[in-house]
Amino acid sequence: MADGRRIDVQGKRYAPSNRVRELVIYAVDGTTRAYHRCEQAPIITTSSFTPAAQRANPELDHPLRQCSSVGAASAEPTCVGEITPPHDGRNDMDADQSPDSSHTA
């Protein structure tokens, strides 16, 4: 982003009966922060999130934004969580690290 933040958008094209589980929440959180060095990672799905995934998300140090198109009255998905403004105008990367940015959105 223009302010230096890195955001990794995760899309999950699942059937309505195949809901996003908590293991996906933990995997996205881990790879987004440790490997891609992103500050935030919204998860957008054509399905919905299991209750366990909904409980797991707020327990993270930096909760992910969860968006689901299931049950939405319009074409717009319903979302939980926010894309937050930068805390100091920079991302959380260390200045001496230069990760490959080709994996981020």
Image (cartoon, rainbow, N blue to C red):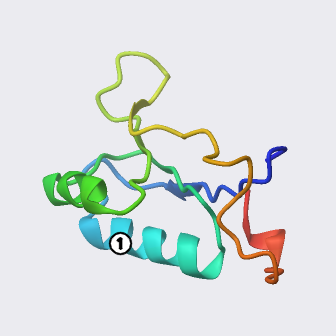
Q: Which residue is mark 1?
A: 26
Q: Is residue 92 above or below residue 65?
A: below
105 left or right of 78 in image: right
Q: Nearer the viewer, residue 27 or 49?
A: 27
Which amino acid type corresponds to the residue marked 1 in the rendered image? Tyr
Q: Nearer the viewer, residue 12 or 3?
A: 3
The answer to whether residue 93 is seen in the rendering is yes
35 left or right of 15 in image: right
Quadrant of the image occupied by residue 37:
bottom right
Q: Find numbered disc 1 in the image and state the secondary structure of the residue it sits on.
A: helix
Q: Is residue 78 above or below residue 42?
A: above
Q: Is residue 46 above or below residue 20?
A: above
> At x 31% / y 59%, what residue is drawn?
20
The x, y position of residue 34, in whole percent, is: 56, 80
The answer to whether residue 19 is seen in the rendering is no
The x, y position of residue 51, in whole percent, is: 15, 52
> At x 23% / y 61%, what residue is drawn?
56
> At x 27% / y 51%, what residue is drawn?
49
Q: Is residue 100 above or below residue 55?
A: below
Quadrant of the image occupied by residue 80:
top left
Furthest toward the left, the residue is 51
> At x 63% / y 59%, what residue is drawn?
8
User: What number of labels is visible?
Assistant: 1
Q: Residues within 10 Å of mark 1 (few under 14, many from 20)?
A: some
Q: Nearer the viewer, residue 30 or 19?
A: 30
The x, y position of residue 3, in whole percent, is: 80, 45
The x, y position of residue 54, in whole percent, is: 23, 51
